Image (cartoon, helix red, strand yellow):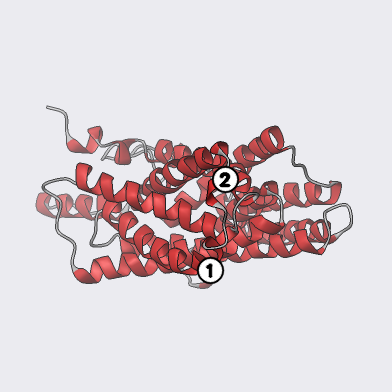
Amino acid sequence: MVSTATSDPVRTRPYLLLGTTMLLWGSGFGSSKVIVDYLPHPVVAALRFGGGAVALLIALRLFRRSDARRASWRDRARAAGAGVLGVFVYNVLFFWGLSLAPAIDGSTIVPVMSPVLTTSFLLLAGKEKASPARVAGLAVGAAGALIFFAGSGGVAGGGQGRLAGDLLFLLSACCWAAFTLAGRRVLAGIEPLEATTYATLSGAALLAVYSVPSAVEVAWQNVPVHVWLNVVFVALGPTAVANLLYYRGIHAVGPASASIMMFLVPVVGTTCSAAFLGESFGTVQAVGAAVLLVGAVLAVTQGRLPWAGRRDGQGSACGRASPITSARARAVRRRRGTRP
């Protein structure tokens, strides 16, 4: 008989799930930019997450485990509350920024700054240690961000409109960092699929209300077919599937390790934006992006990759055992009369 611990892909291959998430997110920047070029940004956000919410509701109906513990109303409300920040506020800022700046900027700022902000908060809260490598990485990252934003505001970078869009991307990264940090608390009493569904539903409902004034002015009959195809893609892939896999990843390895994987997103996003949209960085922006990425990787990883750690007793490839695994191991040792 195959044990549950070794057959569950969330425990045995959490970084494979997170890697898939980052590929979907990276491709979503360019695809969303295509839609924003034809539709108002509030409408695009509502379409993306409205479609994602419908897909997640269907998935919840079809794939929810029969033996899953029924979540309390408090658990559901907590998940919905996380969606207000991580879906509604995040996307209002993100799609507003996307209407002003190229997708290539967003694919660098959001995924790189989100783990940096997550790590910074963990350090300030005393939940992570402020090692010299982390402090140096944060300093280098801050310098890179300043260079990048200076390049955005220059004539070669695109002027004040691009700079304003990049600052909105930065604010959306702050929202995503908070959403990531809330993940463990949200998932304490609810399944990842259910939590993701309620978070997306609450955010999508607010986005729908927010988009009404813009939606009534759209000539829907003139929207090209390729725009609708992109709407379907971003609603299913980078939204419904990716958000579910990300929350499952947080549940398996924690917010700090999960956020490290976001460094894959700039590679995918930059490649897609350059190949399909013809976007590029100015020289100053490119230097800033490189410095920012180096500092971010150093600050978050301290030179250690989380998936390179030893395999724990539950078959997890994490660098350290999860709190659930650790608690189970302590219980076994107590029953055997051994010390930790």
Please tell me how many numbered marks the rendered image carries: 2
The quadrant of the rendering that contains the C terminus is bottom left
Amino acid type at mark 1: Pro
Q: Considering the image in quadrants, where does the N terminus appear?
A: top left
Q: Left or right of 36: which side holds 213?
A: left
Q: Secondary structure at mark 1?
A: helix
Q: Which amino acid type is shown beneath numbered disc 2?
A: Val
Query: What is the distance, in whole Å, between disc 1 and disc 2 at their CAs?
Result: 18 Å
- Residue 23 position, x and y percent, is 52, 38
User: Residue 296, how many percent across, how many down?
Assistant: 63, 53
Out of 257 and 133, give the one closest to the viewer: 257
Q: Is residue 91 left or right of residue 288?
A: left
Numbered tag placed on residue 213 in the rendering = 1
- Residue at point 58%, 46% (across, down): 222
Q: Is residue 49 above or below residue 160?
A: above
Horizontal and vertical percent position of residue 233: 47, 40
Residue position marked by numbered label 2 in the rendering: 223
Asked if residue 78 can be seen in this view, the reply is: yes
N-terminal label among 1 and 2: 1
| Relative vertical location of residue 173 with respect to residue 305 in this rendering, above or below | below
Question: Going 65% across and 49% down the picture, which residue do you hit?
Answer: 37
